Image (cartoon, rainbow, N blue to C red):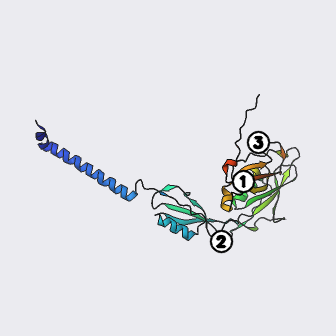
Amino acid sequence: MGIKDIIGNWVVKNLLLAAALVLGIVLVVSICLSVFTRHGQEIAVPDMTQMSSEAAIQAAADLGLNARVTDSVYVRRAPMGVVFSQRPKPGSKVKSGRKIDLTINAVSPKMVPMPSLVGLSMRQAKAELSSRGLVLGKLMYVSDIATNNVLRQIYGGSEIEEGTLLESGSPVTLVVGLNKDDCVTYPPLVLGMKYQRAMDAIQEGSLNVGRTVFDSTVKDYADSLAAVVWQQRPAGVEPTAVRMGTEVSIWLTLDTSKVPIIEFTEMED
């Protein structure tokens, strides 16, 4: 039987037609999916921080994205009424129509009630302040039977009562106990850390952030948030024990090449 005879067979014809129909359907579905989902077409999310909310929403719309304001914060040193942060982050690859959540820096501060911290541990008090939108300012140590037990809470140089309204982001000083038999700590190594993370590490080590110096690479508040610690005193490498409440001074930069490479050697038995 020749090829023409095989092709002319009605069974073979039907099989070929069915195969062609299936192939056609697959091609049509593939094209439709490509059109409707824009398969393979990704958009880089623009950096909308420091823009007004209106400008950010328009910039996103121009790229086929849907930006919306979902939250606000109040940062004293940052420009008011502009985008403070966004999600997804700038540079992220997304598809057209993706929603971009914007957090703006409020024009006026949010007022929050001061919690009662007396009797808590220093770490518990720090977490409670953070949950209320307040920050730990300074640790003041006084002689007491229990180390790091909060004895007083101070704002603006005076004791502050529970329920008093404060601006969000206000620093609160804690007067904490210090037992003479448990009064030393070791400075943490914060080289390479950003300011906020370094400050948290220093405070959690029962120490205070002292002198803070930004080099010439840091031009504005946004830069200060991105800058990393390249020098600290006292040092965190092979540290010497210091009294709790000691100040740790830090120097920050955007030039990460200034951060020293620390090599640790194992201690011999």
Of labels 2 and 3, earlier in sequence is 2
Front in this rendered view, residue 155 or 261: 261
| Gap in angstroms between the C-alphas marked 1 and 2 | 28 Å
Amino acid at dot 2 = Val
Residue 213: quadrant of the picture: bottom right
The residue carrying mark 3 is 237
Is 45 positioned to the left or the right of 84 in the image?
A: left
Is 52 positioned to the left or the right of 128 in the image?
A: left
Of labels 1 and 3, earlier in sequence is 3
**Residue 81's x, y, as percent?**
62, 70
Q: Which of marks 2 and 3 is in front?
A: 3
The residue carrying mark 1 is 252
Amino acid at dot 3 = Val
**Residue 260's x, y, as percent?**
71, 44
Front in this rendered view, residue 115 or 109: 109
Q: Which of marks 1 and 3 is in front?
A: 1
* Residue 121 appears in the picture as rendered: no
Q: How crowded is mark 1: few (under 14 residues within 10 Å), some or many (20 or more)?
A: many
Amino acid at dot 1 = Leu
- Quadrant of the snapshot with the C terminus: top right
Is 136 positioned to the left or the right of 13 in the image?
A: right
The residue drawn where x is 66% and y is 68% is 79
Q: Residues within 10 Å of mark 3 (few under 14, many from 20)?
A: some
**Residue 219's x, y, as percent?**
68, 61
Q: How crowded is mark 2: few (under 14 residues within 10 Å), some or many (20 or more)?
A: some
User: Which dot marks residue 107?
Assistant: 2
The outermost residue toward the top is 269
